[in-house]
């Protein structure tokens, strides 16, 4: 790999230059913009950890990020877990030599831990540059190409079963609205709480632990701050049956769209096709707004979730997250999680009752 000289690093990245780079890169996601990234930092009580890189060939690149802690134990996440994609955006096509120079800078002058979750569409560049960087988690993300327009997406991407379920939802009287109100955010969080309980029971996890993690990851204030920061890019879709929300999807829509959260009342949804109409509505809105891609998030290869996304035309895109460490944070976190789980499983329920965790153990 031919090296390229890094001319200047500015941290944090100046908002005007960051915005200019974000507007130029065709792969930019809302989570990589200054407004969204800084809203994430504020909601977590963290600092702006972004870095602006200028290279000798004239390329400017920004690494969005949130910085946690100070001094020798500080950590940088681009972006924090479950808060969207990070990695580099640039005003010229990125080459592996650009990414390698950034990784070298982070190793030499970055904080004690750096976690990087790049855009899946840039995976090949990161793979070529990141040899030797520890891979935290190989993953596969579903990405739908919208560049042919809505009619092509619907006719060529949607499966027959998807189109049939969309028509069924319409016959069932399902309505979909796009909203940004406090009330609809609360309704979505209620649906998400129901989904968290269902997922925890499916995966053999203690529901209380799953709900604690959800409250840390998705507090009401974070969603409201994000909405206030990015304005119309915050698109919350709710599917309603007889006026009651039964399914929801949060999409961050800019030059590309990213479906970041989904939830439903599974009993109310039943066989109505509501989730299919919900996704179809969000995908159509993104296509008609001129978005190039619609990201549908991670799913395990061969899983039912991956199959669901493929029935809308999404293609699985393999990518990886990377972690650079000067202190063994990953090992410490693994030990802490194992210890916490052991304590929770072994703790007896009040009044001598058999706890759900104990029964499963």
Image (tube, rainbow, N blue to C red):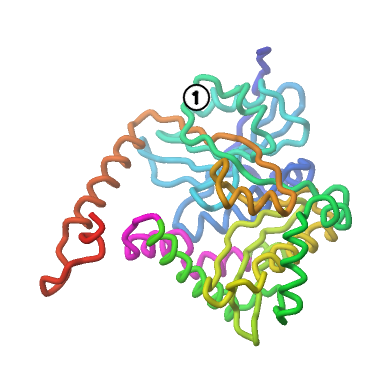
Q: Which quadrant of the rendered structure holds the C terminus?
A: bottom left
Q: Who is closer to the viewer here, 271 or 297? A: 271
In the rendered image of this protein, does residue 122 appear above or below residue 291?
A: above
Tag 1, which secondary structure?
Answer: loop
Give yes or no for residue 227 being in the magenta stretch: yes
Residue 151 image-quadrant placement: bottom right
Number of numbered discs overlaid on the protein picture: 1
Residue 150 image-quadrant placement: bottom right
User: Residue 50 at x, y = what percent?
Assistant: 57, 42
Question: Which residue sits at x=43%, y=40%?
Answer: 75
User: Residue 309 at x, y = what percent?
Assistant: 66, 52
Give yes or no for residue 189 being in the magenta stretch: no
User: Residue 94 at x, y = what percent?
Assistant: 72, 29
Left or right: 353 with respect to 310? left
Residue receiving disc 1 = 133
In the rendered image of this protein, does residue 38 appear above or below residue 168?
A: above
Left or right: 263 with respect to 272? left
Q: Who is closer to the viewer here, 158 or 87? A: 158
User: Residue 292 at x, y = what percent?
Assistant: 80, 48
Q: Which residues are magenta?
A: 203-228
Residue pushed farthest left? 352
What main secondary structure does the magenta stretch of the protein show?
helix
Q: Who is closer to the viewer here, 186 or 274? A: 274
Question: Which residue sits at x=77%, y=55%?
Answer: 158
């Amino acid at each position: 790999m031919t090296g390229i000289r890094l001319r200047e690093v500015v941290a944090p990245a100046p908002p005007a230059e960051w915005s200019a780079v974000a507007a130029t890169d065709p792969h930019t996601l809302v989570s990589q913009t200054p407004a969204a990234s800084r809203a994430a930092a504020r909601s977590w009580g963290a600092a702006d950890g972004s870095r602006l890189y200028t290279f000798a060939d004239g390329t400017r690149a920004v690494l969005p990020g949130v910085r946690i802690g100070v001094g020798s134990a500080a950590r940088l996440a681009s972006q924090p877990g479950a808060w969207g994609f990070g990695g580099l955006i640039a005003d010229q096509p990125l080459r592996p030599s650009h990414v390698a120079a950034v990784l070298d800078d982070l190793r030499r002058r970055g904080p004690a831990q750096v976690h990087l979750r790049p855009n899946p569409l840039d995976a090949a560049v990161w793979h070529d540059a990141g040899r030797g960087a520890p891979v935290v988690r190989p993953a596969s993300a579903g990405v739908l190409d919208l560049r042919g327009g809505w009619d092509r997406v619907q006719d060529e991407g949607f499966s027959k079963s998807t189109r049939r379920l969309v028509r069924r939802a319409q016959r069932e009287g399902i309505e979909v609205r796009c909203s940004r109100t406090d009330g609809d955010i609360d309704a979505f969080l209620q649906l998400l709480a129901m989904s968290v309980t269902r997922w925890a029971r499916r995966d053999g996890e203690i529901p209380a632990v799953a709900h604690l993690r959800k409250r840390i990851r998705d507090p009401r204030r974070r969603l409201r701050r994000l909405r206030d920061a990015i304005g119309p890019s915050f698109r919350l879709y709710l599917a309603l049956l007889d006026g009651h929300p039964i399914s929801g999807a949060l999409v961050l829509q800019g030059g590309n769209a990213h479906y970041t959260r989904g939830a439903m009342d599974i009993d109310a949804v039943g066989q109505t096709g509501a989730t299919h109409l919900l996704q179809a509505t969000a995908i159509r809105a993104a296509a008609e707004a001129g978005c190039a891609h619609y990201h549908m998030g991670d799913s395990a290869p061969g899983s039912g979730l991956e199959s669901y996304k493929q029935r809308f035309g999404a293609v699985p895109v393999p990518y990886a997250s990377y972690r650079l460490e000067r202190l063994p944070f990953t090992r410490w976190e693994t030990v802490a999680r194992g210890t916490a789980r052991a304590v929770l499983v072994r703790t007896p329920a009040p009044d001598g009752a058999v706890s759900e965790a104990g029964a499963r153990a």
